[in-house]
């Protein structure tokens, strides 16, 4: 049994948007017990950094980014570099610490072109992901995290340029340890909203209908457009990823009871290539 703690690091009262830095190792069982938290050899950590108002969110995310770099990154590591507001802050701070000599012999593996650009500006040496890559640690933003299980959803926002859910998920899954930096309102049970699903483009409609039948009454299935308004068919210009796949947004209208069960169900559907659910532990 592994407990995870959410200690307060500020004197101000906790707000509904207090950021969390969540770290997981590769094979864990998690028990949320805030009043009696114990650390074992393999741990999941949730760190609450409080913010007193919505205007303080960016500052609190910055503190979460600094905490992630200062606590988990060591010299000689290969690091997966995520994308998003908090990840950009962490990349900038990591570059600054590298320049002043706090770290040495670091290599960053970016999840997308945006994080590669941020890392290049920060002066972080880069390599690019391959199936044989060994990654010690990774950090990223997440769209939402399921309370208790720490199962996350990525890929809800529009994909830009060469962004790839498959590559992002591969880097995060390969990492020996992983941190997500989020605001507290993205950490909850009974999740709603969408789960992005990558499907083969040739028979996408058959796959969409099967997913629709699977979650009948609980979700709608829309093909994501490249431009214009979203709709069930994806409009005149449906999005095609760099790997040649369509993206279906499975939009849940009822609370998701178990994100892990949703992922398992999607994995068993012919035509589904991957999805935005990520969990590095049972």
Image: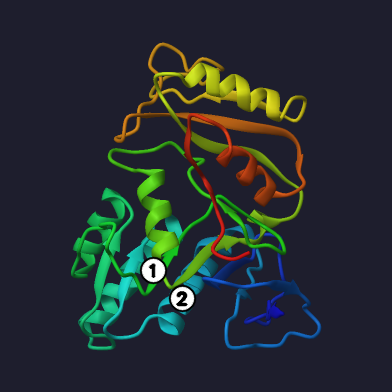
Q: State the residue in front, 213 or 158.
A: 213
Check whether the beta carbons of the residues at disc 2 and disc 1 lie within 8 A of each other.
yes
Could you tell me residue 59's position as x and y percent? 50, 67
**Tag 2 residue:** 68
Q: Residues within 10 Å of mark 1 (few under 14, many from 20)?
A: many
Look at the image and tell me whether residue 21 can be seen: yes
Q: Residue at x 27, y 77 (%)?
A: 96
Quadrant where the C terminus sits is: bottom right
Measure the alpha-carbon separation of dots 2 and 1: 8 Å
Q: Residues within 10 Å of mark 2 (few under 14, many from 20)?
A: many
Q: At 25% from the left edge and 63% from the top edge, which residue is drawn?
A: 119
Label placed on residue 133: none
- Give the camera-side residue of 1 and 74: 1
- Residue bearing mark 1: 90
Q: Does the rendering let one see residue 48? A: no
Label 1: which secondary element = helix
Count up the numbered dots: 2
- Residue at x 28% of width, y 38% of height: 161
Q: Tell me which colouring the rendered structure shows.
A: rainbow
Which image quarter: residue 149? Answer: bottom right
Image coordinates for residue 67, horizontal then vertical, percent: 48, 79
Q: How far from the left and from the top, in percent, is residue 142?
A: 52, 54
Sequence order check: which comes first, mark 2 or mark 1?
2
Q: Residue at x 43, y 56 (%)?
A: 85
Vertical relation: 209 (above or below) 41: above
Residue positioned most to the right: 35
């Amino acid at each position: 049994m592994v407990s995870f703690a959410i200690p307060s690091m500020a004197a101000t009262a906790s707000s509904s948007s207090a950021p969390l830095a969540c770290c997981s190792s590769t094979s864990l069982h998690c028990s949320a017990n805030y009043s009696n938290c114990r650390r074992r050899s393999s741990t999941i950590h949730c760190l609450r950094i409080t913010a007193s108002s919505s205007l303080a969110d960016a500052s609190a995310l910055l503190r979460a980014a600094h905490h992630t770099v200062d606590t988990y990154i060591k010299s000689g590591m290969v690091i997966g570099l995520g994308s998003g507001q908090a990840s950009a802050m962490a990349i900038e701070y990591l570059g600054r610490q590298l320049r002043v000599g706090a770290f040495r012999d670091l290599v960053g593996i970016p999840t997308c072109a945006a994080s590669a650009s941020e890392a290049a500006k920060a002066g972080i040496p880069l390599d690019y992901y391959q199936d044989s890559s060994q990654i010690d640690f990774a950090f990223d933003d997440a769209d939402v995290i399921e309370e208790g299980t720490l199962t996350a959803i990525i890929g809800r926002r529009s994909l830009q340029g060469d962004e790839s859910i498959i590559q992002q998920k591969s880097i995060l899954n390969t990492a020996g340890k992983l941190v997500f930096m989020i605001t507290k309102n993205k950490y909850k049970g009974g999740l709603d909203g969408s789960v992005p699903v990558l499907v083969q483009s040739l028979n996408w409609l058959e796959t969409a209908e099967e997913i629709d039948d699977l979650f009948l009454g609980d979700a709608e299935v829309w093909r994501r457009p490249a431009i214009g308004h979203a709709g069930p068919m994806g409009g005149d210009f449906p999005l095609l990823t760099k790997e040649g796949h369509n993206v279906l947004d499975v939009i849940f209208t009822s609370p998701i009871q178990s994100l892990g069960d949703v992922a398992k169900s999607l994995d068993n559907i012919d035509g589904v290539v991957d999805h935005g659910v990520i969990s590095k532990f049972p």
